[in-house]
Image (cartoon, rainbow, N blue to C red):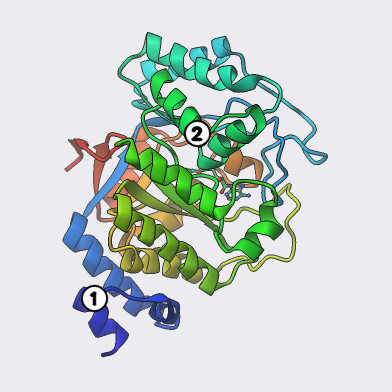
Amino acid sequence: MDIITKVRNKERLGRKEGELLYSLDLYTLGELADEIRQEKHGKKSYFNINRHINPTNVCADVCKFCAYSATRKNPHQYTLTHEQILDIATTSIQRGAKELHIVSAHNAKDGVEWYMGAFRKIKEKFPHIHIKSMTAAEVDFLARYYGYSYDEILDMMIENGVDSMPGGGAEIFDEAVREYLCKGKVTSDQWLEIHEKWHKRGKESNTTMLFGHVETRAHRIDHMLRLRDLQDKTGGFNAFIPLVYQKENNYLKNCNFPSGQEILKTYAIARILLDNIPNIKAYWATSTINLALIAQEFGANDLDGTIEKEAIQSAAGAKSANGMELDDFISLIKNSGFVPVERDSVYNELKVYA
Ligand code: V47
């Protein structure tokens, strides 16, 4: 049976078939992905009103792609105090943020309590705010550096108010590429183990894939299939987020920057291959808003959110430092022919902008 018929019959694709999808032309791939998207989500495009907070750039690890952490290229270290973090949270929540997406570097100076105390203080003041925080890379770092097990760190996160985990730190699972990109950081198996443990606690998380640097198409398929396998076991991933590599101010050279077509194909393939992950997020900070809007026709049904402030992707060249105004975000989605739906962090619908 040919691959197109197989997709239309909803038969699961294997590794070789996944790789073959890239050889289909963009329009065929888009059509297949859109059929699945329309069946699952119709014309709805989800977003949330969120605030990204990046409390420290002091990092014990050196990832070649990262322009955010303090290094020779970016010598300005900073670490926010709990009071500063609480002030940011207060202002954003007063402006309407319903989720705080908190991602830090791997700070070996301030201890586990600096991380946990920040969550606790936010939750004491705002019990209803959703805290999405602690990538599996942060969990692994804190466990290794400060001598805890993964279980202990995950339990501490729950006790101190973390509601869900973001998808960061996954990068590319292929071990050789990972060693080249970010040797010494959480391994692929450990990343998956941490999310599995989190899901077993009845908690949800997201997952990412950093692409468009030195990896091949086969590496991307391998990455997606490892995620699909874990999702079969736990069902705990809400969204898959392909992050388009940003190339400024870092140590990663000789990259194969993806064309717009390649990025759209990757969204479409994710929608087709990841039949058990409900949401494909076009994170506009890395794809640009224009391509994210087009990605809605290539399988993506989520555009992240208004962000407000963002330091990781913008350090590497993305135009996301100051987020986007809610009204602009809504009109852009509407004008592109989709229905903006504000959601909470675990995809309950809050408001449909018909
Ligand atoms: O893990 C770092 C990536 C991630 C670069 O869960 C880069 O909803 C592109 O995970 N170019 C952190 N990307 C951000 C993240 C995320 C973002 C949005 C939503 C969610 C979610 C999670 O940022 C890191 C790394 O893969 N990153 N440097 C760069 N130069």
Residue in front for this viewpoint, 102 or 157: 157
- Left or right, 340 with respect to 205, comes to left
Name the image quarter holding the N terminus.
bottom left
Q: Earlier in the sequence, mark 2 or mark 1?
A: 1
The structure residue drawn at horizontal position 57% and vertical position 17%, both measured from the top left corner, is: 113
x, y percent for residue 56: 64, 27
- Left or right, 11 with respect to 208, comes to left
Ligand 1, by image quadrant, is top right
Q: Amino acid at mark 1?
A: Glu
> How many marks overall?
2
Observer able to see residue 204: no
Q: Amino acid at mark 2?
A: Met
Residue in front for this viewpoint, 327 or 343: 343
For disc 1, the marked residue is 11
Observer able to see residue 24: yes
Q: Compared to 271, does 182 lie above or below?
A: above
The structure residue drawn at horizontal position 41% and vertical position 65%, both measured from the top left corner, is: 225
For disc 2, the marked residue is 134
The structure residue drawn at horizontal position 42% and vertical position 37%, both measured from the top left corner, is: 165
x, y percent for residue 121: 46, 11
Residue that lies at the very extreme toward the bottom in this rendered image = 1
